[in-house]
Image (cartoon, rainbow, N blue to C red):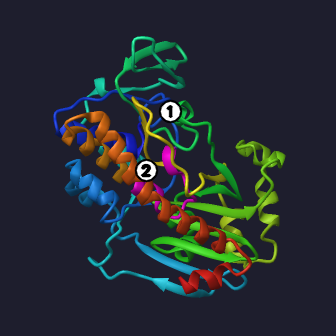
């Protein structure tokens, strides 16, 4: 379940071994909705998974190697506090837009491998064995194995455990700046070729250059989850409300919000407890955010894709696929635990009172 990076990587690795899988996804089509910002795939994780899927060379050919810069700006002056600009050919984490990655991962698969507009409402045990999926238009299955690559609010995980993600106390509001090289040239220079951070007063502005001359801006701040403005409906939250939270910040940074073409999304940041795991449930497993959602510090998609490749390889190499799933889960939880602890600690420091100093010390 889920035609994101994890689900599609899983299907591709199985496909290379001659196994088939059917992917169910609630999106109406590949590009029916915005997929989110850019991703940097790490050599030992996301790129390794693509290699095992037979897609690494194609990824290298289409990734944005020129957009690997990172810079940290002073929130009061917009002066550069730290900058990392890889020399040509030296950067190891090229960027790729999520939709471009999705299309890459879909390209080897047949149309029959994906069921679009198939929103899964519930995963239920079938009387004859296996599990069935209840969709909006009826039930399908049963299936011997259901793999949940369906994100933080995974329906598959709900069939395994009642545990749900907790709110971190921090929310992101996403803004879009479009045609930046012509319409927002000064902001384009401010952000640079990659990712810009400005941190202070337990808040942050993060701006990422995407493809097609677009910049996504994330305004990050502490807010009660019960706040009516944090319902996930951007229309209920005005840009002026967000801008007021940064009223004493440097003018160029405030313009990342004030000049935005669109307030695109409100995202309360959720995470599962780092020490979380559960006994293996025959016929069900989860990978990626469904298993270990953590704050967005560039790690989640890499772990998700590596989970996917590891699970696929475990299935095809085990004499009993059920034992292969159990072995995979033990390794996945062990790997994710330490990374999740570090990620949640780093996220809290990033949006603490000394966020910029903490970032400089890392």
Q: Position of residue 221 (x, y in %)?
A: 73, 64
**In front: label 2 or label 1:** 1
- Taking the magenta stretch, the answer to whether it contains residue 298 is yes
Q: Residues within 10 Å of mark 2 (few under 14, many from 20)?
A: some
Residue situated in front as seen by the camera: 352 or 195: 352
At 49% from the left edge and 84% from the top edge, which residue is drawn?
A: 83
Relative to 247, 6 lies left or right? left
Alpha carbon separation for disc pair 2 and 1: 23 Å
Q: Is residue 78 visible?
A: yes
Residue situated in front as seen by the camera: 215 or 133: 133
Q: Quadrant of residue 177?
A: bottom right
Q: CB atoms at circles 2 and 1 under 8 Å apart?
A: no
Relative to 151, 326 lies left or right? left
Magenta span covers which residues? Answer: 289-304
Q: Which residue is mark 1?
A: 156
Compared to residue 16, the image places residue 264 above or below, namely below
At 52% from the left edge and 38% from the top edge, which residue is drawn?
A: 33
Classify the position of the N terminus by image quarter.
Answer: top left
| Residue 223: image tag | none
Q: Is residue 148 visible?
A: no
Q: Position of residue 69 (x, y in %)?
A: 44, 76
Residue situated in front as seen by the camera: 201 or 146: 146
Q: Quadrant of residue 256?
A: bottom right
Q: Residues within 10 Å of mark 1 (few under 14, many from 20)?
A: many
Q: Position of residue 47 (x, y in %)?
A: 29, 59
Q: Position of residue 39 (x, y in %)?
A: 43, 59
Q: Which residue is mark 2?
A: 98
Q: Quadrant of residue 347?
A: bottom right
Mark 1 secondary-structure assignment: helix
Q: Of the residues under marks 2 and 1, which one precedes in the sequence? A: 2
At 70% from the left edge and 44% from the top edge, which residue is drawn?
A: 232
At 54% from the left edge and 30% from the top edge, which residue is drawn?
A: 159
């Amino acid at each position: 379940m889920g035609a994101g990076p994890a689900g599609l990587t899983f299907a591709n690795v199985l496909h290379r071994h001659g196994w088939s899988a059917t992917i169910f996804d609630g999106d109406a089509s590949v590009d029916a909705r915005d997929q989110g910002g850019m991703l940097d795939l790490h050599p030992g994780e996301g790129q390794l998974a693509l290699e095992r899927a037979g897609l690494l060379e194609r990824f290298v050919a289409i990734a944005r190697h020129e957009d690997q810069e990172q810079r940290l700006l002073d929130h009061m002056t917009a002066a550069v506090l730290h900058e990392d600009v890889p020399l040509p050919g030296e950067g190891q984490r090229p960027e790729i837009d999520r939709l471009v990655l999705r299309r890459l991962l879909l390209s080897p698969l047949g149309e029959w491998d994906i069921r679009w507009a198939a929103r899964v409402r519930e995963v239920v045990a079938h009387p004859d064995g296996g599990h069935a999926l209840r969709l909006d238009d009826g039930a399908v299955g049963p299936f011997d194995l259901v793999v949940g690559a369906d994100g933080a609010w995974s329906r598959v995980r709900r069939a395994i455990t009642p545990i749900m993600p907790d709110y971190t106390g921090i929310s992101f509001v996403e803004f879009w700046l479009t045609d930046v090289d012509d319409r927002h040239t000064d902001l384009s220079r401010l952000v640079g070729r990659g990712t810009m951070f400005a941190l202070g007063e337990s808040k942050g502005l993060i701006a990422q250059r995407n493809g097609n001359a677009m910049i996504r801006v994330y305004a990050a701040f502490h807010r009660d989850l019960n706040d009516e403005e944090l319902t996930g409906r951007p229309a209920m939250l005005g840009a002026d409300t967000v801008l007021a939270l940064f009223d004493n910040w440097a003018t160029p940074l405030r313009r990342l919000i004030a000049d935005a073409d669109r307030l695109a999304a409100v995202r309360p940041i959720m995470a599962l407890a780092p020490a979380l795991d559960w006994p293996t449930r025959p016929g069900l497993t989860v990978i990626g955010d469904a298993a270990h959602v953590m704050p967005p510090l560039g790690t989640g998609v890499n772990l998700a894709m590596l989970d996917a490749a590891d699970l696929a390889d475990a299935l095809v190499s085990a004499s009993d696929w059920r034992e292969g799933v159990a072995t995979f889960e033990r390794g996945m939880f062990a790997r994710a635990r330490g990374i999740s602890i570090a990620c949640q600690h780093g996220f809290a420091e990033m949006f603490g009172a000394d966020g910029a100093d903490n970032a400089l010390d890392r």
